């Protein structure tokens, strides 16, 4: 498979909803798609990264209204274990059609839960819309705190927006300060599990989206599955998005492909290096567990 | 339509939750029995007293070593089946019977319970307590394709079933601790929350993006580790998730 996975269409897009754009990280794609899907009855609710009990700490949350969606909009650069709610959403919340947003690894987890529903009773046919977000790597909450408070010298609670782009991690505070740190300094904070990840653009999502490839304030969108494609076409027809052909925007798909290739090449090397990390008594290499080969 | 395969359920030291799960696919069970499989042996559901020859034997429950009949029936099931499945947490890992120390009513003398792989070779595991009806359905459809399908279907079924067979090779000890030993300690956890969502007894919570296991609650069913996308992730199957899910759905209509 290509590093960008299978997709039916790729496009640059931005929400037409002003309320969403005010809160969104980039083009407001995920929030707008869920709002549209809720409105149309495509989903009964969505599992999103809602506000948690500490500043910038997300908490997985089932939302059923646009107001709740808006409260969850925007990117938090730390882990929100959204998959932890998929069985709960169909049971305690009684949802028959669940929307979920996730990083590429979380979308992988959802597809595994559907194909091998070992402890996921009555979930497989209730995942109505799985939206993926591009992801290079993720950070623990404590790592994010170290970046914001130690490196950028800002208090977590005073930050109003965080962003990654153009080689920098940037925080914007409520009083108008802007602090930055170079992205290359965050590598030591990346959670180890990300170093074996072989997916950048959520290849297994119904629709995946991220800022890379599109101009500021816009997002790149891949409509992937049959279902995802139908939802995307419906949302466009309903006027939810302004769009531009992806081959007419800068930097375009070339940058997405470049970053995906870099990530996957680097991490495939990590996966391979794990096979020979140690030493057996007979002098041959001893390896760690490889999830892509066997449990 | 090719000839049906034969499936049986051998009931050892389990709570019958696994057997109930077979029926929990509702009309799916009728479709399976109409087109793909004959149920040739099962407590209550089939009026056959002695373990017959069968293609697939689902074994529910751990094996009580203090009960000669259990040991004999398990060996007989192994000898008479092509594919022997540890069906559910007890058969695969001992599950709740791992905590038995004897003295319980109404068989106080029975205290030694082992996962069935201590007694016989096991081909495939379906972990969790209870197992999930949709997983049983998927395995039944794949077993049918493996035994009766064309070359392409056999290839798909083999690819699908391989990780479940590898689980059987991996061993018969399971615990929420696996999330520590085999995922986090191995540098593989990325905090998706699947384990917490899977755990049937809510022993796993996510704390700052990583699983935290309440070991007093854990029943050792093996669900969290088997469901974890970093226990295994077979791209050859997963990349075709749409096609496979459509195929299973089609087979069940």
Image: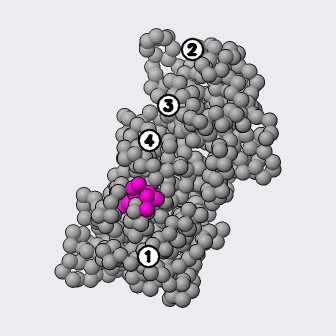
Q: Residues within 10 Å of mark 2 (few under 14, many from 20)?
A: few
Residue under pointer 4 = B199
Circles 1 and 3: CB atoms closer than 8 Å:
no
Residue under pointer 1 = A239
**Residue A248 colored magenta?**
no
Circles 4 and 1: CB atoms closer than 8 Å:
no
Residue in view at x 68 percent, y 27 percent: B39
Which mark is nearer the camera, 4 or 1?
A: 1
Same chain for the residues under marks 4 and 1 in the image? no
Residue under pointer 2 = B66
**Residue A42 colored magenta?**
yes
Task: Give me the chain letter of mark 3.
Answer: B
The secondary element bearing badge 1 is classed as loop
Magenta-colored span: A40-49
Task: Give me the chain letter of mark 1.
Answer: A
Task: Give the mark, 3 or 4, whose residue is nearer the N terminus.
Answer: 3
Mark 1–mark 3 Cα distance, whole angstroms, equals 53 Å
Mark 3–mark 4 Cα distance, whole angstroms, equals 13 Å
Tell me: A128 left or right of B137.
Answer: left
Circles 3 and 2: CB atoms closer than 8 Å:
no
The secondary element bearing badge 2 is classed as loop
Residue under pointer 3 = B95
């Amino acid at each position: 498979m290509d590093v960008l996975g299978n997709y039916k269409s790729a496009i640059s897009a931005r929400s037409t909803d002003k309320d969403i754009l005010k809160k969104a990280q980039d083009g407001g794609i995920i929030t707008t798609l869920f709002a549209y899907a809720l409105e149309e009855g495509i989903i009964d609710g969505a599992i999103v990264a809602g506000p948690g009990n500490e500043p910038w700490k997300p908490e997985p949350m089932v939302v059923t209204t646009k107001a709740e969606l808006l409260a969850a909009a925007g990117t938090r650069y730390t882990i929100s274990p959204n998959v932890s709610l998929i069985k709960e959403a169909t049971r305690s919340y009684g949802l028959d059609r669940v929307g979920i947003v996730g990083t590429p690894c979380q979308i992988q987890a959802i597809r595994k839960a559907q194909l091998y529903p070992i402890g996921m009773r009555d979930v497989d046919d209730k995942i109505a819309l799985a939206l993926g977000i591009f992801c290079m790597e993720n950070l623990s909450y404590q790592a994010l705190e170290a970046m914001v408070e130690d490196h950028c010298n800002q208090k977590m609670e005073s930050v109003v927006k965080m962003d990654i782009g153009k080689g920098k991690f940037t925080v914007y505070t409520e009083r108008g300060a802007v602090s930055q740190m170079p992205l290359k300094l965050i590598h030591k904070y990346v959670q180890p599990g990300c170093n074996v990840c072989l997916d950048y653009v959520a290849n297994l999502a119904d629709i995946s989206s991220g800022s890379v490839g599109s101009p500021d304030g816009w997002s790149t969108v891949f409509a992937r599955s049959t279902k995802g494609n139908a939802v995307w076409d419906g949302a466009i027809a309903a006027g939810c998005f302004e769009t531009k052909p992806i081959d007419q925007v800068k930097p375009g798909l070339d940058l997405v492909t470049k970053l995906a290739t870099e990530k996957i090449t680097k991490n495939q090397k990590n996966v391979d290096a794990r096979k020979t990390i140690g030493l057996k008594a007979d002098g041959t290499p001893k390896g760690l567990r490889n999830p892509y080969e066997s449990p | 339509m090719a000839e049906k395969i034969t499936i049986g359920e051998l009931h050892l030291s389990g709570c019958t939750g696994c057997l109930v799960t077979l029926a929990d696919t509702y009309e799916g069970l009728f479709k399976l029995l109409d087109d793909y499989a004959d149920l040739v042996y099962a407590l209550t559901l089939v009026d056959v007293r002695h373990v017959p020859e069968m293609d697939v034997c689902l074994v529910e429950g751990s094996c009580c070593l203090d009960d000669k009949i259990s040991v004999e029936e398990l060996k007989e099931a192994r000898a008479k089946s092509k594919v022997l499945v540890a069906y559910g947490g007890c058969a695969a890992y001992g599950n709740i019977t791992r905590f038995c120390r004897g003295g319980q009513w109404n068989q106080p003398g029975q205290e030694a319970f082992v996962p069935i792989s201590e007694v016989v070779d096991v081909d495939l595991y379906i972990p969790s307590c209870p197992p999930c009806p949709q997983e049983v359905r998927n395995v039944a459809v794949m077993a049918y394709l493996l035994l009766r399908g064309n070359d392409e279907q056999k290839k798909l079924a083999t690819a699908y079933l391989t990780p479940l067979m590898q689980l059987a090779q991996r061993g018969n000890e399971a615990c929420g601790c696996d999330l520590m030993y085999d995922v986090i300690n191995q540098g593989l956890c990325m905090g998706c929350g699947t384990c917490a969502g899977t755990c049937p007894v809510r022993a796993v919570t996510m704390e700052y993006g990583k699983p935290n296991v309440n070991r007093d609650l854990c029943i050792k069913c093996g669900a969290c580790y088997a469901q974890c996308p970093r226990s295994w992730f077979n791209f050859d199957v997963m990349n075709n998730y749409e096609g496979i899910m459509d195929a299973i759905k089609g087979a069940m209509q």
